[in-house]
Amino acid sequence: MTDDAALEQGREAFGLQRWTDAFTHLSAAARQTSLEPDDLFLLGTAAFLIGKADETVDVLGKAHHGYIALERPDRAARSAFLIGFQCMNRGDVAQAGAWFTRCQRVLDESGVDCVERGYLLFPAAAMTMFGGDPATAEPLFRQIGDYAERFRDPDLMALSRLGSGECLIKLGRMAEGVALHDDAMLSVTSGEVSPYIAGMIYCAVIESCQEIFDLHRAQEWTAALDRWCATQQDLVAYRGQCLVHRAEIMQVHGAWQESFKEAELAREVLSRPPPQPAVGAAFYQLAQIYRLRGDFAKAEEAYRKGNEHGRPPQPGLALLRLAQGQVDAAAATIRRVLEETQDQAQRCRMLGAFVEIILTTGDVAGARRAADELADLAEALDSPYLRAASGHATGSVLLAEGNPLAALTALHSAAAIWHTLDAPYEAALGRVLIAQACRALGDEDSAAVDLDAARRAFIRLGAAPALARLDELDGKSEPKAAGGLSPREVEVLRLVAAGKTNRGIASELVLSEKTIARHISNIFIKLGVSTRAAATAYAYEHNLV
């Protein structure tokens, strides 16, 4: 292919948003001839959009110098800004600052009035906001919007609304801030802005949704952006912390396997040199899935790795200690952490775990204080997720206080919200508490129905520890053997290891085949295996045969 043909194909592919093809053809043309700055700019943009960070900086640097030679200061400044933007995204703060300074110098020396002056305000406004001064940053973002409006630049307008919205949320003006974020996201999903900044806007909006516990909006915008990304070849829209937030959303919706894969991808991407701070959050999310599925050793290792990378391991590690039966250790940790935590959003994340752990110690009064605080925060933040968590915590406390009827009111209210949020694990935990309240009121039939529904949910999710606790509550288990197996499950496992079929096991134990199938399903979940051969190997390795 001639250099002219490769260049034309690269330009055409770029216009059609076939980013990999654009990068391939433009790179081929660049190897054969010296590209003009405009074509280098296209190549650098394509490199960014498919996740080639080093190529992005290298090619846009060449475009920058080419524009300088052609005396096009606005385009030279834009190239410098985008390089700084890329460096900032991957955590190279010093390099980002150097390129932003270069951008400023080019504009100052030229004296040109252009939209790039508005872009250059964005890093300073963002640093002011994240430095804890949203009141000062918000007028800066509005000034950015003035540049965007004057030069009719939709990218800069979206960035202005993004920053202003974040400032307003931090200032407690939730409705106004969320409305601006919705507007910025709409400009992304409707194709009004370039793909270059689309991923940044999405990540910032999703992170904001997580901070105010607006999971429904986070899920809605995630689905919308997924559909948008599907129309563009090999687009890498998700970078940084938003990779972890996507995994968190998937976990809430019961897609634990997908959540694990997304968290593992986040860990891989964020660990690339230089590792980004958000890699700690990726390890924490992996630990959460391990804990919920009962792989406690891997969970502890992941919590510790997350802590090494700056993500504190609580409340997950305290909940792991509780699941391991180390109640005193769990209680001591969660008490200390809650006392140290002043940030409102962080306290929201701690209070539910605090109630669960402290109730196991018999400190009902302490649990009541925490549940009441969570209720106040849920009311202040007007978050459905927090209202459901608060109802669950309050219901738990009311049960411990001996008031099952009032507990049912709180728990049924929480259950309705969990259903709306499509949160199957939390809903199943609520069903267990509802069953306990029904039993306390003498309604065994209703209790059995809710326990059965919870059991099916735990099995479907692979929630081995929750399933084991349910067995104990339902009177179907005795002290556990290796792997958390009940004596009956050990008995079934031994017969599986002996090569017996389900029918043969049922005949020997005088049980139905359906019951045997359920036991085997539970055994597979608790042991983390998927075949009879693997279960057999486990039985021999742990001397259960």
Image (spheres, rainbow, N blue to C red):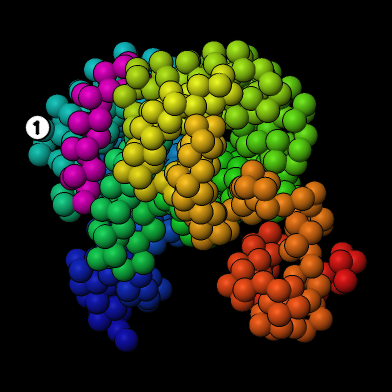
Q: Nearer the viewer, residue 457 or 406?
A: 406
| Residue appearing at x 80%, y 49% in the figure | 479
What residue is pinned by disc 1? 150
Looking at the image, the residue that sits furthest to the right is 543
Instruction: State the image coordinates of residue 131 (x, y, percent, origin top left).
Output: 45, 20
Instruction: State the image coordinates of residue 415 (x, y, percent, origin top left).
Output: 39, 39
Secondary element under disc 1, as helix, strand or loop, is helix
| Residue appearing at x 66%, y 82% in the figure | 503
Give above or below for 114 relative to 79: above
Instruction: State the image coordinates of residue 413 (x, y, percent, origin top left).
Output: 36, 32
Circle 1 Cα neighbour tier, 10 Å, few/some/many (<14 / 14–19 / ≥20)? few
| Residue appearing at x 26%, y 60% in the figure | 227
Image mark count: 1
**Magenta segment includes 82:** no
Image check: 140 left or right of 24? left
**Magenta segment includes 179:** yes
Q: Quadrant of residue 124?
A: top left
Give above or below for 265 relative to 518: above
Q: Which residues are magenta?
A: 169-189
Give above or below for 516 relative to 78: below
What amino acid type should be assigned to the residue bearing mark 1? Arg
Report the quarter where the N terminus lies. bottom left
Asked whether residue 82 appears in the rendered view, the answer is no
Q: Nearer the viewer, residue 179 or 188?
A: 179
Q: Main secondary structure of the magenta part?
A: helix
Instruction: State the image coordinates of residue 482 (x, y, percent, origin top left).
Output: 82, 57
Report the quarter where the C terminus lies. bottom right
Looking at the image, the residue that sits furthest to the bottom is 1
Image check: 79 left or right of 127? left
Q: Nearer the viewer, residue 79 or 290?
A: 290
Asked whether residue 525 appears in the rendered view, the answer is yes
